[in-house]
Image (cartoon, helix red, strand yellow):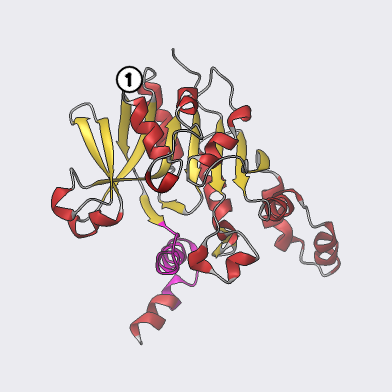
């Protein structure tokens, strides 16, 4: 069966982010700022730039009202105060936020086991039987391109594919930290499987997988609470690998630069990358670093 190209995205942030405690006991990890925007907004904007028209954010019970306030609250009191001070231009970022496409925030189904596949399964009712969709993990940010755009364009060239996943080439010495892709056919760039954190000498390639996927509704038959894997968790990668049994899963290299924000060091590096790319004080930061 061929599915309609995606117009919907599922973005997940349903973990406890223990590496960022104590701040994440109060706010979701993806609400940590990069520049003047939270990580989640950067991920949403990646979707918007690719033409996605509806976004489903899957959060924890505690995180759900925080995301709803951020994406739904127009902060009229702030608008009026800025207007009274002659600073209307400072409201522009909020106005842009309020003009984003439809965003729905849901809580991860507590009946599902722990695992990065459970937030996706929790959003099942928002996906029609005849449409493909994209999935993004909110702790992955991409600079210089939209992986969502790449996913959709690749799917348009391979409409028979069961899924499309994005990969980034990484240095050999760090391959034991990631899920590494084994290709079934290098010429066609089709997936065989993904090897989680292999010994460096056993890594099947230098292509690492991260949280940017285009999936078809067939994935939901594998994202079942009974299909837990390592550590009794429900893994997206396991479901994607099972889909290989039914047809091609296409691997596409990112056209940008992927950085994770999943731990404090990686978050700091992503923050620095954003500053170098977007802020008018980037040269001041470079000078400050050079004098250390």
Quadrant hosting residue 181: top left
* View extreme (left): residue: 201
113 shown above or below 40? above
Kindly identify which residue carries mark 1.
Answer: 247
| Residue 138 highlighted magenta (yes or no) | no
Q: Is residue 178 left or right of residue 10?
A: left
The residue located at (53%, 43%) in the rendering is 113
The residue located at (40%, 69%) in the rendering is 265
Q: Is residue 279 visible?
A: no
The residue located at (60%, 44%) in the rendering is 58
The residue located at (56%, 40%) in the rendering is 112
| Secondary structure under the numbered disc 1 in the rendered image | loop
Q: Is residue 286 left or right of residue 66?
A: left
Label 1 Cα neighbours within 10 Å, binned few <14 / some 14-19 / many ≥20: some
Q: How many marks?
A: 1
User: Of residues 244 and 232, which is closer to you in this image?
Assistant: 232
Residue 100 rendering spot, x and y as whole percentages: 66, 43
234 shown above or below 62? above
Q: Is residue 225 left or right of residue 272?
A: right
* View extreme (top): residue: 1
User: Of residues 291 and 211, which is closer to you in this image?
Assistant: 211
Residue 50 rendering spot, x and y as whole percentages: 50, 36
**Viewport quadrant of the C terminus:** bottom left
**Viewport quadrant of the N terminus:** top left
Where are the magenta residues, as a range?
A: 260-284
Residue 267 rendering spot, x and y as whole percentages: 45, 65
Quadrant hosting residue 26: bottom right
Residue 227 rendering spot, x and y as whole percentages: 44, 34
| Residue 275 highlighted magenta (yes or no) | yes
User: Of residues 118 and 55, which is closer to you in this image?
Assistant: 118
- Majority secondary structure in the magenta region: helix
Q: Is residue 45 visible?
A: yes
């Amino acid at each position: 069966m061929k599915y309609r190209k995606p117009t919907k995205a599922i973005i997940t942030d349903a973990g406890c982010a223990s590496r960022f405690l104590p701040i994440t006991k109060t706010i979701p990890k993806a609400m940590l700022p990069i520049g003047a925007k939270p990580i989640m907004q950067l991920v949403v904007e990646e979707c918007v730039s690719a033409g996605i028209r509806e976004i489903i954010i899957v959060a924890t019970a505690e995180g759900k009202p925080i995301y709803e306030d951020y994406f739904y609250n127009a902060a009229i009191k702030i608008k009026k105060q800025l207007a009274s001070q002659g600073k209307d231009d400072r409201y522009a970022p909020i106005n842009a936020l309020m003009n984003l496409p439809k965003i729905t925030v849901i809580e991860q189904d507590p009946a599902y086991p722990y695992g990065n596949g459970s937030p996706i399964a929790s959003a099942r009712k928002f996906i029609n039987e005849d449409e493909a969709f994209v999935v993004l993990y909110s702790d992955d940010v991409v600079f210089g391109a939209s992986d969502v755009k790449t996913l959709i364009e690749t799917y348009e060239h391979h409409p028979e594919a069961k899924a499309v996943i994005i990969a980034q080439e990484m240095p050999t010495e760090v391959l034991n930290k990631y899920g590494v892709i084994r290709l079934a056919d290098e010429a066609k760039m089709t997936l065989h499987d993904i090897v989680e954190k292999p010994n460096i000498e056993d890594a099947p390639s230098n292509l690492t997988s991260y949280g940017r996927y285009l999936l078809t509704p067939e994935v939901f038959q594998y994202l079942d609470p009974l299909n837990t894997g390592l550590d009794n968790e429900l893994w997206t990668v396991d479901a994607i690998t099972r889909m290989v049994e039914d047809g091609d899963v296409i691997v596409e290299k990112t056209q940008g630069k992927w950085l994770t924000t999943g731990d404090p060091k990686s978050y700091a590096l992503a923050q620095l990358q954003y500053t170098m790319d977007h802020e008018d004080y980037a040269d001041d930061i470079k000078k400050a670093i050079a004098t250390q």
